[in-house]
Image (cartoon, rainbow, N blue to C red):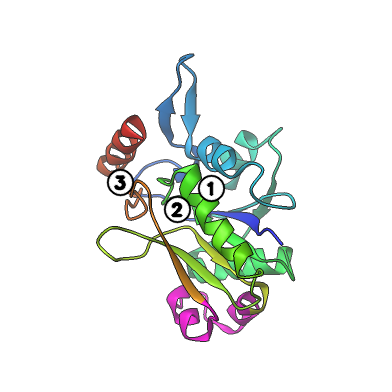
Amino acid sequence: MKPTLVILAAGASRRLGQPKVLARVLTDQDGKHKTVLDWLLETSRGLCQNKPLLVAGADPQPIQDACAGEPLEVLHHPAWDQGRTGSIAAAVRARAGQDLLVWPADSPCLHRRDLEAMISAFLKADSPPRGWIAPRCPDGRFGHPLILGRDLLDRVAKMRPDQPLRDLREHAQPLGAVDLYHSGARINLDTPAALEEVRSWFREA
């Protein structure tokens, strides 16, 4: 069973000065600007099941407006400031019983082929209910997005909203990783300087 895409875009983005999911990261051959949201939807198209879910919080209206006509559901999470794990818990409630591809808007730098490899690894393991699949960078560290099994996600409801999601790893079975083709999964889109780094990655991708 393929996972369902969940885009995490609830943070305030104070240092960046705009919602991360709406940041322009690429201009295509026709001169059309593409945002983080465009990239996440295009990269995952056809690889996931069900309608994608975007979790908004601090600044929901511009995101809601940008998503008009897009094939996804926007969920407003009022308690966004309590922590990212709380946003994931809101997504789990909205997509109960489903495996999730959890993709934070501040980590957009992932090739489609890498996402295909992650989902393939999850499916080859028979969509394990307690599965955890992460992208592994050349330096051995892990990045985002994550694929999390439905039973593992049930534990999120018992976690504090500000508790690190990595605390779930001890309950994962299997705990898997996929080596990246072109690493960008450690780039954190949180400042104007980081946005330029993201844009540079997209130019070279």
Residue 169 visible in image: yes
Q: Which residue is mark 2?
A: 12
Indicate whether residue 84 is drawn in magenta.
Answer: no
Which is more toward the observer, 114 or 84?
114
160 up-or-down from 7: above or below: below
Nearer the camera: disc 1 or disc 3: 3
> Which range is magenta?
152-174
Q: Which residue is mark 1?
A: 59
Q: Of marks 3 and 2, which one's residue comes earlier in the chain?
A: 2
Apparent side of residue 36 relative to residue 77 in the rendered image (left or right): left
Which secondary structure is most common in the magenta stretch?
helix
Q: For the residues labelled 2 and 1, say whether their Cβ atoms are less than 8 Å apart.
A: yes
Tell me the quadrant of the picture where the N terminus can be found.
bottom right
Please state which amino acid type lies under the numbered disc 2: Ala
Q: Which residue is mark 3?
A: 191
Q: Quadrant of residue 178?
A: bottom left
Q: Which mark is residue 125?
A: none
Please state which amino acid type lies under the numbered disc 1: Asp
Q: Of marks 2 and 1, which one's residue comes earlier in the chain?
A: 2
Q: Identify the residue shown where x is 62% and y is 54%.
A: 5
Indicate whether residue 165 is drawn in magenta.
Answer: yes
Which is more toward the observer, 43 or 68?
43
Tell me the quadrant of the picture where the C terminus can be found.
top left
Q: Identify the residue shown where x is 64% and y is 37%.
A: 67
Gap in angstroms between the C-alphas marked 3 and 2? 12 Å
Apparent side of residue 203 relative to residue 166 in the rendered image (left or right): left
Q: Residue furthest front?
A: 124
Mark 3: give few (<14), some (14-19) or many (20+) Cα within 10 Å: some
Which is more toward the observer, 54 or 204?
204
Mark 2: give few (<14), some (14-19) or many (20+) Cα within 10 Å: some
Please state which amino acid type lies under the numbered disc 3: Thr
Q: For the residues labelled 1 and 3, say whether their Cβ atoms are less than 8 Å apart.
A: no
